Amino acid sequence: MSKFLEFIDSQVLLMDGAMGTQIQGADLQVEKDYWGQENCSEILNLSRPDFIRDVHMKYFAAGSDAVETNTFGGSTLTLAEFGLEDKTLEINRRACELAHEAIAEFAHDGRQRFVIGAIGPGTKLPSLGHIHYDALEAAFMQQAEGLIEGRADVFLIETAQDPLQIKAAVNGAKLAMKQKNITMPLMVQVTVETTGTLLVGSDIAAAATVVESLGADVMGLNCATGPQEMADHIHWLSKNWPRGLSVLPNAGLPEMHQGKVHFPLSPDEMARWMERFLKEDGINIIGGCCGTNENHIASLNAMLERQANLNNKNVSKRRPAPAARTHHWVPAVASLFQQVELRQDNAILAIGERCNANGSKKFREAQDNEDWDACVDMAKEQIREGSHTLDICTAFVGRDEVRDMSEMVSRLRGSVTAPLVIDSTELIVLEAALKLYGGKAIINSINFEDGEEPAHKRMQLAKKYGAAVIALTIDEQGMAKDVERKVSIAHRLHKFCCEGYGLPPSDLMIDPLTFTICTGNEDDRKLGLWTLEAIERIHKELPDIQIILGLSNISFGLNPPARHVLNSVYLDHASKRGMTGAIIHISKIAPLHKIPAHEVAAAEDLIYDRRSPEAQVA
């Protein structure tokens, strides 16, 4: 564990206040101090290092344990807006050096202090189509390289407004760490507007689902509002988020006074709010954003020292330990807008099957005619019917699958609330879709039909983009039909994905496969029963994973009314055995009490291979 993570695990860490507030309040000249680059605060790292160093020293003098580097707009893309892209490494490296120089001025007191490498969101939102993922990731990677060279202790991806931008920043930082052969903690702070969501519409649960899937060590909130408006979101994180928590509010909601922006929250008021968060929500890191200055930090520092000494009456301490909190992280996927739990209360996770060029004639024709509005309408209709997620497959002979998948994901990501299941046998299609999607998706699918190499490549995508995975019980010998092979391959998939790649077991969705039992062939009669028995075994032996089925396969070959009955009955039996989700046409599933008893009995006879003369499916 890094020294930073050890610190916040044992005591509350105090960060600094706003850098922008200090810069905007200073008498700086465009030509002399900004080198003609008006509003480019990052150029001050080179043109006025004395000023930036002094800002850091003010905050350390006020009691900060850590300061953020002056690199909010330090990505290559943002600096390119000022013609400074070739100075990305230098600007970020120098920013860290200035923070370290400020720390050196306080070395005599023996306190542990940290340099937080700040990575702002930039000016373009990928989920709104402003920029492609690859360009954003590359820009953040170069910024992260500069922060590493300057010896930042932590990466802070802050003021995040778009989950896809978070993915690009996190992955850019990870690529830089890999290149530099170093490991550093990752913090992510999102900005929740007064609307209650991020700028692109994500609620706090959707944002947290994405951030958790990327492996961030700390999550929190900063900017946009004051602490009062953050309270509900902080409380949600406290009850759900499993790792470190940070809160860096503005000094209240901004107001206009005589043509100037004013932040109304006083240092004492800020301290009272943060004390409440510490006691009620178990926060690990506090500090300030827009409108806060060294007076706010001094007030927070005094509050922390008071709390530390109240809790340790015989020992003079500077920081209290974080308050104990009980959290419950619920495994989930997410669209751009909302979280969907992988295990539904009293139901299975319904994955809508109709946006699939292989399985839906209506969708295939709309896709072939490039009637994308009709395709989107089909997706929305499935959500209205009750689908929790949507399987998207655009594989169609003679068409460009990458282009078609990109068209679908680009439209669906902003128009449907259900998370997407990206369904393709082609790696390039999966990656193209994931680069467009800010939510936490599901990859459909991986298997061992061609050995482990293709599965390796798909798992690399899953880990990079924070996706759950559907894994089929297929190995080099083909599709598993009997119980033992299904269970054996399920264990192999679990070991491969969870032990080999660190995929949370809850994000592994094993499909033990079901096949039609309606051929009349002797060899096929027990296939449905064997799948049920395999589900029961897998559920018992691997209780934390998800188990799903492509349900409609069981009834292939029957007429539509009979299929509806058999699918409904089989779904009920599979759910009772431990199945947690299914790829289904939800509107064609009926509760068993609405199906005539003799039809249910006939379907059960077929499933369990009970060969009485009376058994038939209506």
Image: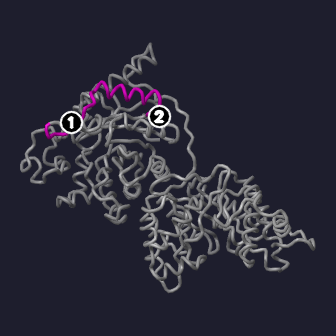
Q: Is the residue 442 above or below the residue 290 in the image?
A: below
> Is 261 included in the stretch rendered in magenta?
yes
Mark 2 lies on residue: 9
- Between 616 and 154, the residue placed more toward the observer is 616
Is there any visible trace of residue 457 in the rendered image? no
Mark 1 lies on residue: 262
Q: Residues within 10 Å of mark 2 (few under 14, many from 20)?
A: some
Picture residue at 73% right of the left edge, 64% below the top: 568
Residue placed farthest to the bottom in the image? Answer: 398
In the image, what residue type sits under mark 2? Asp
- Between 12 and 108, the residue placed more toward the observer is 12
Is there any visible trace of residue 85 in the rendered image? yes
The mark that comes first in sequence, 2 or 1, is: 2
Q: Secondary structure at mark 1?
A: strand
Q: Magenta part of the protein: which range?
A: 258-283
Q: Is the residue 448 above or below the residue 268 in the image?
A: below
Mark-to-mark CA distance, 2 and 1: 35 Å
Judge left or right: residue 226 versus residue 241: left
Residue placed farthest to the right in the image? Answer: 613
